[in-house]
Amino acid sequence: MPRYLDSTAGTQLVTLGAWLDEPLKSGLSAYRMQMGYADKAAMQHLCARLVAKPADLVRIAIGGNHASLTPEAALAACSAVQTGVTGGGLAVGSYANALFHPKTIHVLRRDGSSAAYVGYAHFTLAGHGRNVESGLVLDTKDGDPSSLLSEIASAIDAWFRTHRYRLIESSVSRPRE
């Protein structure tokens, strides 16, 4: 069953940051994200977690409308993507008539289970715990349909398959250590 995260509950346990920390500490096979806004500090935190426990695949699609993506945040995102053992990519979405504004994270754990966050929080330190935010968490460990979680992963992966939307991609790969 989906779990509702609502930071108005007054505890850090119901924030995007708290939810994300668990799988990052345990280690992942894949980390996928599409976010309208990201800041340097949150990206650096993600990168540190991924350096400590590298994922095989790291794909990040972030928004670049109206100077929403600072050079510092973009560099931190590149660093996070480069932690991927077998590959990854960074896509920046920017439109003349709309904002790139999704807020979705999908993780694939080493045991084959997967989880996703779909909500309102931006990928910023404020969005991870200080702001009042809400969202839903789906997890195959909780009985949520793997088909729905696969659909979320596939939607993020589409940014790296279709040139129609992709503006920038930096694919990287490095040998397994």
Image: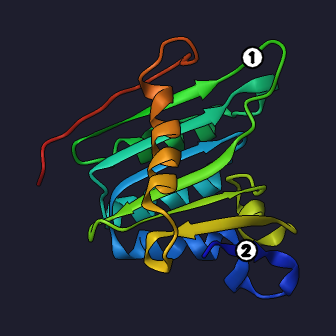
Q: Earlier in the sequence, mark 1 or mark 2?
A: 2
Left or right of 135? Residue 115 is: left
Q: How many labels does the image show?
A: 2
Work out which quarter of the rendered image holds the N terminus and state it.
bottom right
Q: Mark 1 points at which residue?
A: 95
Question: Is disc 1 in contact with disc 2, using a CB cutoff of under 8 Å?
Answer: no
Q: Quadrant of residue 70?
A: top right
Q: Name the residue under label 2.
A: 4
Q: Residue 3 in the image: state x and y as whole percent.
A: 66, 76
Q: Say the numbered circle drawn on residue 156.
A: none
Left or right of 144? Residue 58 is: left
Q: Residue 141 in the image: state x and y as whole percent.
A: 43, 77
Q: Residue 38 in the image: state x and y as whole percent.
A: 67, 45
Tell me the element at label 1: loop
Q: Residue 15 in the image: state x and y as whole percent.
A: 71, 74
The image shows residue 3, relative to residue 65, as above or below, that is below
Please give the name of the residue rendered at 47% of the width and 18% of the height, measured from the top-left corner: 162
Work out which quarter of the rendered image holds the C terminus and state it.
bottom left
What colouring method underlies this structural image?
rainbow
Measure the alpha-carbon separation of dots 1 and 2.
31 Å
The image shows residue 142, relative to residue 108, as above or below, that is below
The amino acid type of the residue labelled 1 equals Tyr
